[in-house]
Image (tube, grey):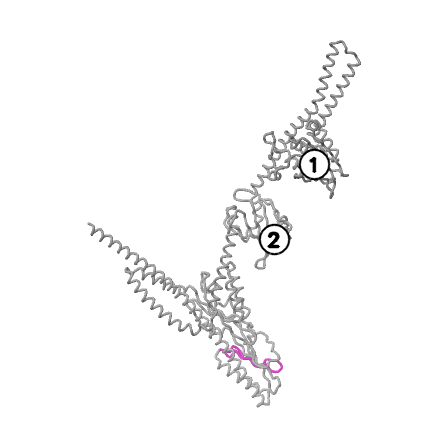
Amino acid sequence: MSKNWKLYHRIRKSYRSIIALIIIGIVTVVVLTIYSYVSFRDNLITKEQEQLLTIAKTTSKTLEDFLDEKKKDSTIMVQTIVDDYHDSLKKDEITDFISYALNNYFKIQNGKIYQIQFYDEYDQLIYSTIQFEETLEVAADTKPFQVPKGLDGPVIGEIFELENKDLAIDITTPVVVDGEHKGHLRLILKMEMMYRLYLEEIRIGSKGYASLKDSDGVLIMHPKNEDIGVNVMEARKSEFPDYDWSELETLVELQKLEESGTGIYHSIWYQDASKKRVKKFSAFSHVKLENDFWILTVSMDYKELSDLATNYFYNNIVIIGLVPIVLVILLFYILNLRKNIVYLENEQKYIKQVKALNKDLEKDIEERKELEKALYASKERFKRLFNAGTDLIFVLHRNPTNETYEIIRVNDMACKKFNKSREALIDKNFLSLASNTTQIAMDNFSKCIEDDELSVFEMDLILAGGITPFELSGQVFSLDNKTLMMLIARDISKKKAQEEQLERDRGLLIYKFRLVAMGEMIANIAHQWRQPLGSLSLMISNLDDAYDHHDLNEDYFKSTMNNAQNIIQNMSAIIDDFRYFFNPRQEKTSISIKNQIESSLEMVKDRITIGEVNISLEDRSKSCIYGFENQLSQVVLNIINNSIDAMKDMTNRKIDIIIDECDHRIRVMIFNNGENIPDEVLPKVFNPYFTTKANQDGTGIGLYMTKMIIESNFGGTIGMFNTEDGVCTEINLPIGE
């Protein structure tokens, strides 16, 4: 039994080792296969780019040689004409000879020369020939030609249009006999002829072709006739305005530097009916002229090349999956790898022959890829930011034709809120989405944004759920020679509701404050009525005693009644003072700060007396303020009452009031010698419902209402700070109205 158990464990351990080896082998093979694919693909791409560059350079050199050959032919024919001038005496004989010689040369060219012209010393056209032996009168297929001056040899002119809109180029050579100008010989070459001879047969893959541009990027040779004579970038952007042409634009600018190279970019194959945007290889070289150059470009489909590498990778994966045994997989991979190595070595022999021409190519490609990645990442970031958040974003363009604000871009949130697709909102007039905004108001808003005079603008938009108030902010910017405006709309319906609730709460606070203030005033009335009531009670008792003891005479009775009447009038005056406090006069008046403070102190004189508070008042001002007297009294009473409460534990209680004037404002400083307010409490004393007298029936609205009256009704400021001897309340009020 023990032997069998040991044998079982040995077999199990061996089995695990085999499984581990198989897994390691499979992982190794997969890694090596991927590495082989990447190496094969990269080498194949590099080789193909070098081949394209070789084709471009060879073709551009062929075009240069062709033009040089025609310049040499022109020189030879001019020399023949000069020799004829030496040998002939009559101009008619010279003309006949020139016609004969040029006509023979024209026929020998067999279509390579479109037209030959000879101008005499007076710049008059005396001979012209064209293909198919057409006569001069019938075949005048060129526009009027201005004979250049001061030439000392054959010169290639600029590209021009024939009467039939075909493009052509001329080679003009002066005829000089013994230092005397006798005319010019002009050879006209059609660009279409050169294209058929040297570029038309160039086909790279199933779609690749060659094209030629001038130094400004204008196509002069291309398989698609409609693109000839237009700028390559303008043609692409005009036909496909929604595509990103930055890669091609960068490549064209690089081509204008008159250096050979290669590039990878996205574009359209002209022969593709679906106009699908694809990735292309491109190599470019330059045809050098006297003072200018042409750009020859050879393009190839990137996918055709990448498919070759992809098929290679898939073939390896399929082969690996079919081999059941790890050793066979490894053996097959080694054999396949060796085969690939041999293939790559053969390819390297060819690559080394042209490698010297493109030492910096790999570095340029990597930099271009990094730039492409950065551009793509930047575009994606902008797209995410544009569609992120809860705000509605619109990009508008003001159409000068109908003066409408056309929507050219919206974010996802706008589509969601309006319950419309992006296509339904694009090109729509923005004002059609608003319920209460006119064209004039929108124009003024746009102008304010341009002048940086306005930051926000409220507007009601008609959403899918109904009319909703929005707060709009904007920015004007330029893009593609257009002035655009970006609007960011923020839903303020909740804000409006909160403001309405705040107004209701504020009214409640005012009502509650007035109730509290009324309670305090009733307490003050009680303080001021306590002594008069006591005096009245004593007078009534004395009258009663005098009556009982028969001491009540007429003089005593009238004297007592007169004193009682005076006391009652004083009590009535106290009631009137407090009645005006709660029922203010409707019109504002000019107020003397000192007089109003003294009047307020008179209302609480009993509390001041009972509390043994020493009050001093110093007035340094000469001006008055403007407002309601009772509201200022309410402010003073609140501060005095709070000061008295703060000094309840002090033995020597005092309040110092100083009034002075500075910078067209009156400043009132009310000092008390109570304890300092803690630093963490001081910033909160004017907050609603904040109180340090919770156990003493404090409401927390007295100082809040005081601050609201000073700021809202008087246009002033109020603050509180600690001093060495206690606490100071500072009020600043504007002088006059």
Work out whether mark 2 precedes mark 1 in sequence or the reverse, and give the earlier one.
2
On whether residue 122 falls in the magenta region, the answer is yes
Which x, y percent locates residue 343? Answer: 36, 70
Q: Is residue 579 visible?
A: no
Which of the two residues, 541 or 153, is positioned nearer the viewer here? 541
Report crowding for label 1: few under 14, some 14 to 19, many 20 or more residues within 10 A (C-alpha).
Answer: many
- Judge left or right: residue 619 versus residue 55: right
Query: Which region of the structure is painted magenta?
Result: 112-135
Residue 350 on image: x %, y %: 41, 73
Q: Quadrant of residue 152?
A: bottom right
In this rendering, position of residue 732 left or right of residue 429: right
Looking at the picture, which amino acid does disc 1 mark? Answer: Ile
Q: Residue furthest left?
A: 1
Q: Position of residue 356 (x, y in %)?
A: 46, 73
Q: Nearer the viewer, residue 13 or 678?
A: 678
Number of other residues with Cα within 10 Å of mark 2, as a class: few under 14, some 14 to 19, many 20 or more: few
Secondary element under disc 2, as helix, strand or loop, is loop
Left or right: where does residue 483 sit relative to residue 270? right
Q: CA distance from mark 2 to mark 1?
A: 62 Å
Label 2 or label 1, whichever lies nearer to me, is 1
Where disc 1 sits, the SS reads strand
Mark seen at residue 670:
1
Q: For the view shown, which residue lies furthest in the right direction?
A: 555
Q: Is 393 situated left or right of 26 in this image?
A: right
Quarter in which the C terminus is drawn: top right
State which quadrant residue 599 falls in: top right
Front residue of 575/71: it is 575
Residue on which the image places disc 2: 403
